[in-house]
Image (tube, rainbow, N blue to C red):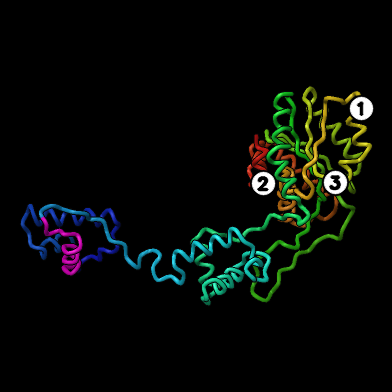
Amino acid sequence: MKPHDARQESEEALQLMRRQAHRLRHEEKLSWTRIAELLGIGLTTMKRWVSRYCLDNPELGGVVSFKRGRQVGTHRTLGLENERELRDVILQERPEKIGIALAMWTQRAVQQAVKIKFGVDMPLRTVGEYLRRWGYTPQRPARRAKEQDPVAVDHWLQHTYPAIAKRAKAEGALIFWGDETAVRQDTAWVRGYAPQGQTPELTHATRWTSISMISAITNQGLVHFELHEGAINTERFISFMAALMRDNAGRKIFLIVDNLRVHHAKEVMRWIAHEDRKGLIELFHLPSYSPEHNPDEWLNRDLKTHLRSKPSAKNGSALRQMTTDFMSRLETIPSYLKSYFTHRYTSYAAT
């Protein structure tokens, strides 16, 4: 009978066979040739097991298979220390800081960094293998304005917002985060597979009257939104705040927004300060140029991603309906709305 290829067996089966071989040798006093026949393996394999797993000893040792191939971390272009140094550079520095004329850490940027720091000409394919091994993936960057004041942002995160949250808890107020966005179906960045050299085509309708959305969310999973033809002006912003108060009657509203001119308008301040609304709604402003710290900004990004993934709307009414459908679904999924408060830049507002 032709011996069976033991390499096709599972690790559990191999360990059992080695234990059986040891028992047959020391309890039944059989020869290794006979044991190999009974187990259905080749004599060469049997002898290798005897040597590798010490099956000829009365006391059985380990029977776990040795790993084949080279050990992890050996025969690599970069040593472990160089790998750690390179990972630290990618995490802590921008490419231009080490003389690379690229804005982001792409494979080509990492390739150049390896050449600059270690004098190694590493192929792009190898660069990709290193990045995958480290768990690094290509991601869309979060945008940050150069005009942003880090000191003001830090003060907001460490002092201003915690004070707002403390007041809201003491006064039983709801904290809403508001924002406006243009509703567009800009599909320029969408990608689709096609044969090389045959660029896929995407039909789209001509531009129609612009649609704007104003929305506000809480870390409890509540959302309020309105759609308007054209931009959000002072009158529409005031109308939105009035509707927000009606929908949450009996609860004080703390509304946090960015520094859009409309949010600072005199008419808005007079409306909030009116005797009928005093103590019922307050307006707070994020630090300038800091949209990433507004959880509602992440809702807007989600909406735009959803719209871009859909077939092109034939007209403004169709686009408006697509937006309404998306937002209406969000209203029924509080847990999903809460996820906008789990990003690195917005987790501070989760409680």
The span from disc 1 to disc 3 (Cα, nearest Å) is 22 Å
Location of residue 299 with respect to 248 vertically, above or below: below
The three-letter code of the residue at mark 2 reads Tyr
- Residue beneath disc 2: 345
Location of residue 105 with respect to 249 vertically, above or below: below
Disc 2 vs disc 1: Cβ atoms closer than 8 Å?
Answer: no
Would residue 337 be counted in the magenta stretch?
A: no
Q: Position of residue 171 (x, y in %)?
A: 74, 24
Between 251 and 81, the one nearer to me in the picture: 81
Q: Earlier in the sequence, mark 1 or mark 3?
A: 3
- Residue beneath disc 1: 274
The three-letter code of the residue at mark 1 reads His
In the image, taking residue 144 as reference, residue 278 lies left or right, namely right
In the image, taking residue 179 as reference, residue 4 lies left or right, namely left
Between 202 and 274, the one nearer to me in the picture: 274
- Whether residue 256 is visible here, answered yes or no, is yes
The three-letter code of the residue at mark 3 reads Leu
For mark 3, give the secondary structure: loop
**Residue pictured at 28% horizontal, 59% vertical:** 9
- Residue beneath disc 3: 260
User: Where the C terminus falls, by quadrant?
Assistant: top right
Q: Which residues are magenta?
A: 42-57
Q: Earlier in the sequence, mark 3 or mark 2?
A: 3
Q: Position of residue 155 (x, y in %)?
A: 72, 42
Crowding around mark 3 (Cα neighbors within 10 Å: few <14, some 14 to 19, many 20+) is: few
Q: Earlier in the sequence, mark 2 or mark 1?
A: 1
Q: Position of residue 252 (x, y in %)?
A: 78, 26
The span from disc 2 to disc 1 (Cα, nearest Å) is 34 Å
For mark 2, give the secondary structure: loop
